[in-house]
Each structure stands twice: as C-alpha cells, then as structure tokens.
Image: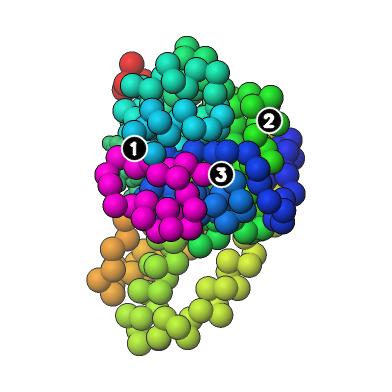
Amino acid sequence: MPNDAAHVAPAATGAGTDPVTVIGLGAMGRALAGAFVDRGHPTTVWNRSPGKSDELASRGATVARTIAEAVHASPLTVVCVVDDAASRELLDPVGDKLAGRAVVNLSSDTPERARSAAAWATSHDVAYLDGAILVPTPVIGTPDAVILLSGPQHVFDAHRPTLQTLAGNLHYLGPDPGAAALHDLAMLDIFYTTMAGILHALALVQTDGVAPTRFVPFAGQIVEILPPIIDTLAAAVETDQHPGELDRLQMEVTGIEHIIDSSRARGLDVSVLDAVRALGDRAIAAGHGDDSFSSIVGALRKLSSRNEESTT
Ligand SMILES: NC(=O)c1ccc[n+]([C@@H]2O[C@H](COP(=O)([O-])OP(=O)(O)OC[C@H]3O[C@@H](n4cnc5c(N)ncnc54)[C@H](OP(=O)(O)O)[C@@H]3O)[C@@H](O)[C@H]2O)c1
C-alpha cells in the first residue's frame, strides 16, 4: 500500500451496534451482509431480484420490501452491485431519501465513474465513499480481507468502525473519490498481465512434455524475484532515470525474441510477448537500447498520448 495511505488495523472482534443497509445481494453483497449480521450489526438488505435474501433473513437480516425502505433503515448504506451504472440506476430514484445519510459504494468501476458517482452524491447531500474489494467472498469479514476506500476523510472516520467489520485491511487512500478505483485497476493490471504470462509459460513447457505441475517450483522462483524489482521499477518511473549498467533493453528484447521464436515453433500464441517486444522496439528506436528495461515506460506513455490525441 502507498505510504500515505492510512492502514487501519482489524477490528476483528467485538459486536457492532450501528445499523447498516446492504444493497445488492450477489455473491459479494451476500458476503458483506453476512459479515455485518455475524458481527451483530442490525442489518437491512435489498436486492433488485428476489430470492437472494432468504439465507441472510434466516441469520437475522431484515429484508426490505423496497430500496427506499432499505436506505431509510440505516444511516449507512453499503452498495455492492455489478458496476457504477447499476448502482446509479438503483440510487438515483432514492436520492432524496439518502440525503443526510452515507453511502459506501463497493461496486468495481473506473476512477472517472467513481468521481462522477461522488459528484452525484454531493449534489444529493449524500456523504459518499467509493471503495474496491480486493479479495474473494470467503475472505470478507476476516483480518486478511482488503478493501480500499477513498472520499472525504470525515466520512471515512465516521464509518470506519462499521467498515472494519468487513475487512482487517481497510486502506483509506485520501479525498479523491477515484483513488480506490485507480489502485484497484492498477493492481488488477499486474494481476491479469502476470496471469497471462504464467499461463503462457505453463503452455510452453507442456509443448515439450514437461508437466505444468513440475514447472511450479521454477515459476515460483521467477515470481519471488519480483518484489524487489517493483521497488527498482517504481524508483525508475518516478525519477525517469533508466541506467542500463545491469540490464540493457537491447539484450532483454533479444531474450524476448527467443521466447517468441520457441513459442511460434511450438504453435503457441505470442500476442502477449509480441506486445512486450513492440514496446521494447519502440523504446530502442527512441534511443533506449543501452538503457534498462524500465525505459519502455516512455513507450507506454507515448501510446497514451497518441490515444488522447485520437480521441480529441
Ligand atoms: N465476487 C467476488 O469475488 C468479488 C471480488 C472483488 C470485487 N467484487 C466486486 O463486487 C461487485 C459485485 O460482485 P458480485 O460477485 O456480487 O456480482 P454478482 O454475483 O454477479 O451480483 C451482481 C449484483 O449486481 C446486481 N445488478 C446487476 N445489474 C444490475 C442493474 N442493472 N441494476 C441493479 N442491480 C444490478 C445484481 O442484481 P440481480 O440479482 O437483480 O441481478 C446483483 O445483486 C462487482 O463490482 C465486483 O467486481 C466481487
């Protein structure tokens, strides 16, 4: 987590007394509501489609008949639906009922849509935090659960004890309501690109008859070297300094070509590696062949400027 983020230790024990409403009873919404119920919070639940609240009701949750009744029941409403468009569709008609109350929106979406939702909330006099959940449903309500939150500090402070019921690792990322979504997307950026690399490597060894499970220790070794490399890359990106004394981009692109050649020869898709090589080629063309691998960040930034130009 960023150094300036407030990391809040778990309130893993003790009963909650503050009433809370949970809107959205998909897999995650049910887990959130269940954690509140288990910790003793008077919990009201509502979902667009019926039939998802039965188990929660049997555990003590109150099932509201309408969304208006649901938001009226508690000073804090936690929303967890598929995305911000769905949450806006639900909250817009009850904006007046929410005035003077708080909403914590844990639906995943983009920073831009989180900021737009926060502006909607401000215009309706709703205290608003945007959040992102970084763990699967069984982890909710445990010390290992991670939730990022952003929005006004006073709203976070007021509802922190209730929200700690959900996650031992509650990270407040500051007043920009888009910050939680931004960090969520950046972490998922690492997750999905890494997963694609791992799957490609497993498919590669398999083509020569090596069982993917036998490759696991080797995959683990390469993944283990990454944490200190993240520190080095972050410093390089922050300072825009990419000295190539220890690793030259030209050398690394040659190595990537070896993986591409071997993969092609085995009939494997190389689109992910081709994309990495293309970034390397552009950085080399811009004069970074003797700089470190981190210098491809310039090519990433240039692509982003090109995208901006093409959309304006
Ligand atoms: N599940 C996870 O492991 C996990 C982990 C991290 C983050 N999250 C995030 O948590 C959020 C909810 O995920 P989930 O797993 O609970 O999803 P889910 O099981 O697919 O449930 C989706 C929820 O959104 C509601 N919904 C969808 N479209 C709607 C609309 N147009 N209007 C009103 N309600 C609508 C659904 O209501 P109906 O029942 O009426 O369709 C349901 O309550 C997502 O943003 C997801 O990214 C989930």
Amino acid type, callout 1: Arg
Determine whether the residue tagged by mark 1 lies in a helix, strand or loop.
Answer: loop
Q: CA distance from mark 1 to mark 2?
A: 28 Å
Compared to residue 177, the image places residue 211 above or below, namely: below
Q: Quadrant of residue 197?
A: bottom left
Determine whether the residue tagged by mark 2 lies in a helix, strand or loop.
Answer: helix
Q: Nearer the viewer, mark 3 or mark 2?
A: 3
Residue 55 part of the magenta segment: yes
Q: Residue at x 73, y 38 (%)?
A: 6
Compared to residue 59, the image places residue 264 above or below, namely: below
Q: Which residue is mark 3?
A: 42
CB-based contact (under 8 Å), mark 1 and mark 2: no
Residue 37, percent across and down? 54, 52
Compared to residue 288, the image places residue 12 above or below, namely: below
Looking at the image, residue 297 sits to the left or right of residue 45; the answer is right
Q: Which residue is mark 2?
A: 158
Q: Which mark is residue 65?
A: 1
Residue 56 part of the magenta segment: yes
- The furthest residue to the top: 123
Q: Is mark 2 within 8 Å of ligand 1?
A: no
Q: Which residues are magenta?
A: 42-63
Q: CA distance from mark 3 to mark 2?
A: 17 Å
Mark 3 is surrounded, within 10 Å at the Cα level, by few (under 14), some (14 to 19) or many (20 or more) other residues, namely some
Q: Is residue 216 or residue 257 the one in the foreground?
A: 216
Amino acid type, callout 2: Ala
